[in-house]
Amino acid sequence: PKEYEPFVPGPVRFIAAISRFFSIRDRDDNPGARFANALEKLGPAYIKFGQILSTRGDMFDPVFAEGLSRLKDKVPPFPLETAQAMLNADWGEPWQNRLQSLSEPIAAASVAQVHKAVLKPTDAFPGGETIAIKILRPNIVKRMTRDMDVIAQVSNIAHTLVPAIRRLQPTAFVAEARRAVMLELDLRLEAAAASEMSDIAEATGLFRVPVIRWELVDKNILAADWVDGTPFSSP
């Protein structure tokens, strides 16, 4: 953003000036919102990184942070046929052996998407229960790894060329963000965290966490009881 030009080296300011010459003029006045729009176009790893940045009020002024907080995590879903193929591969059998039905994507984000499904009867379960199935995007681990490598390189360059930001420890921050993002790509860890939260909820009696369907959980798949609700962000 132009507002931060005094803090970067001359060559970088020159490149920025050229890029702005070709930029769209009716852009957002908030530099944080402009940065968020750029991250959305770059892909899922950048979206996740931007969401982490938006929580760092110690690094940015309130106006920039507010603009960055608009960063969205909604992207077009991948086809149902792809999701079915991923279930077959992870479960080692046709998905129809475990589910009566599998809906089109209900919601899609940068890392995974959610489908509504109905369980098939088995010896252990009566079947007919409605569940939510979260499936990682194809090749997301490879893409996240590649993009986080690029972000790490940028942080190293910034650390070298912009002494003023060294106190913020950009390389250490990116390393921690990378760790958080990569952990999110193993849905078994998310299932375990939800299970622990369920134990806490039961002890307090104040809220309820959907039951994890462990027999369906895998590295790329998370399954839990379906719960209808209203997002906190709804008007």
Image (tube, rainbow, N blue to C red):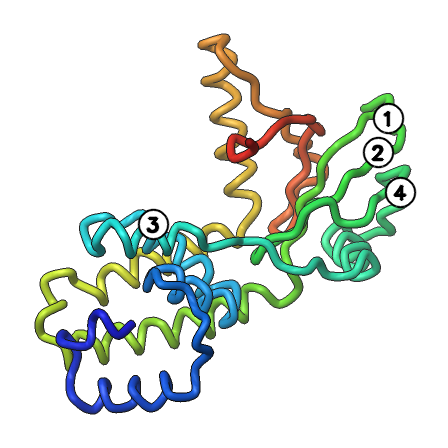
Q: Residue at x 88, y 40 (%)?
A: 101
Q: Which mark is residue 97?
A: 4
Mark 4 or 3, nearer chain start = 3
Q: Which mark is residue 22?
A: none
State how far apart marks 4 and 2 are (Cα): 12 Å
Pointer 3 residue = 66
Q: Counting other residues with Cα less than 10 Å from the Cα at mark 3, is it few (<14), some (14-19), or many (20 or more)?
A: some
> How far across and how far down the image is residue 169, in percent?
16, 62
Q: Counting other residues with Cα less than 10 Å from the Cα at mark 4, is it few (<14), some (14-19), or many (20 or more)?
A: few
Q: Are marks 1 and 3 in contact (CB under 8 Å)?
A: no
The mark lying in front, picked from 1 and 3, is: 3
Q: Helix or strand or loop: what does disc 1 sit on?
A: loop
Determine whether, in the image, residue 105 is placed left or right of residue 142.
Answer: right
Mark 3 or 2, nearer chain start = 3
Q: Are marks 1 and 2 in contact (CB under 8 Å)?
A: yes
Pointer 2 residue = 118
Q: Are marks 1 and 4 in contact (CB under 8 Å)?
A: no
Q: Counting other residues with Cα less than 10 Å from the Cα at mark 1, is it few (<14), some (14-19), or many (20 or more)?
A: some
Q: Helix or strand or loop: what does disc 3 sit on?
A: helix
Q: Are marks 4 and 3 in contact (CB under 8 Å)?
A: no
Q: Counting other residues with Cα less than 10 Å from the Cα at mark 2, is it few (<14), some (14-19), or many (20 or more)?
A: many
Mark 1 or 2, nearer chain start = 2
- The kind of residue tagged 2 is Val
- The kind of residue tagged 1 is Gly
Q: Which mark is residue 127?
A: 1
Give the image quarter of residue 81: bottom right
> How far across and how far down the image is residue 9, in percent?
15, 84
Relative to 57, does residue 16 appear above or below in the rendering? below
Q: Residue at x 84, y 33 (%)?
A: 118
